[in-house]
Amino acid sequence: DIQMTQSPSFLSASVGDRVTINCKASQNINRYLNWYQQKLGEAPKLLIYNANSLQTGIPSRFSGSGSGTDFTLTISSLQPEDVATYFCLQHNSWPYTFGAGTKLELK
Amino acid sequence: VQLVESGGGLVQPGKSLKLSCSASGFTFSSYGMHWIRQAPGKGLDWVAYISSSSGTVYADAVKGRFTISRDNAKNTLYLQLNSLKSEDTAIYYCARGEYTTDYPDYWGQGVMVTVSS
């Protein structure tokens, strides 16, 4: 199985900050990497698919980059409503596997 | 797209439970579907997938115990959970598989399954 190592586990930032979250795959997953946002008590929501494509309706302050084994989710200017846990998912091969998550809080 | 899970609850170890996911707002029969779970306070754990043609894939942790199925006439996805263990305690989400590459795109709100004596 492909292991997804996500970092950091916890992140505290201020409104307006640029925030980056990383995922590293244990083997090449091409660009088959998604990012999801999960707010407290809610279902996950797709933000970015195929490494760098913005899902419909997601604000443009969210962006993704990377290919192969190293990927990054960037929030260009943190907003209060971005407080959530963020997960990466590899869908290059079965079984699909998630990163452990990054909990983002406001400083 | 709307996905609504049901059928969760408290069940004893070794017993069975069947979850349902009612789908609307899209052509259900044309899409693959996933079950994904989340243990309390933990991360996401992919469980199973069924294609539009009813091919299936399972996580090793549930293979031989869980069965994913679908009824296209009822626009409903199912997960049969047998031989339940305490470590199966989680919120179970159904999610639609994106049309061309099958990754989970839209998710339901989830249903809680608690395995305890």
Image (cartoon, coloured by chain):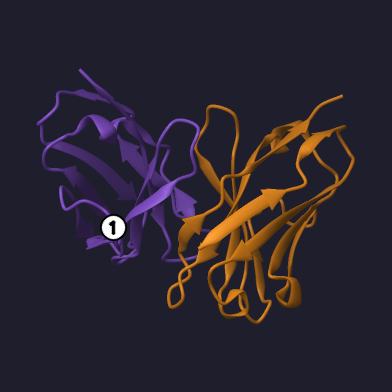
Chain colours: A purple, B orange
The front one of A103 and B26 is B26
Q: Quadrant of residue B84?
A: top right
The furthest residue to the front:
B25
Q: Residue at x 30, y 30 (%)?
A: A83
Side of B34 relative to A28 (left or right): right
State the image coordinates of residue A26 (x, y, percent, origin top left). 37, 52
Q: Chain of mark 1?
A: A
Q: Which residue is mark 1?
A: A57
Q: Residue furthest top?
A: A107
Relative to B76, residue B80 above or below: above
User: Compared with residue A44, is residue B42 higher up or lower down, i.e. above or below?
Assistant: above
Res. A94 in view: no
Secondary structure under tag 1 reads loop
Residue B43 appears left or right of A16: right
> Three-letter amino acid code at disc 1?
Gly
User: Is A52 situated left or right of B89 in this image?
Assistant: left
Q: Residues within 10 Å of mark 1 (few under 14, many from 20)?
A: few
Q: What residue lies at 27% left-to-right and 34% top-to-bottom?
A: A81
**Image point 33% across, 40% down: which residue?**
A6
Asked if B26 appears above or below A78 in the picture, the reply is below
- Which quarter of the picture shows residue A16? top left
The location of residue B26, given as percent across then percent down, is 53, 72
In the figure, residue B39 lies in which quadrant?
A: top right
Q: Relative to B10, say whether B32 is above or below.
A: below
At x 47% / y 66%, what residue is drawn? A93
Residue A13 visible at all: yes
Quadrant housing the C terminus of chain B:
top right
Point out residue B22 in the picture as x, y percentages from the top left corner. Answer: 67, 60
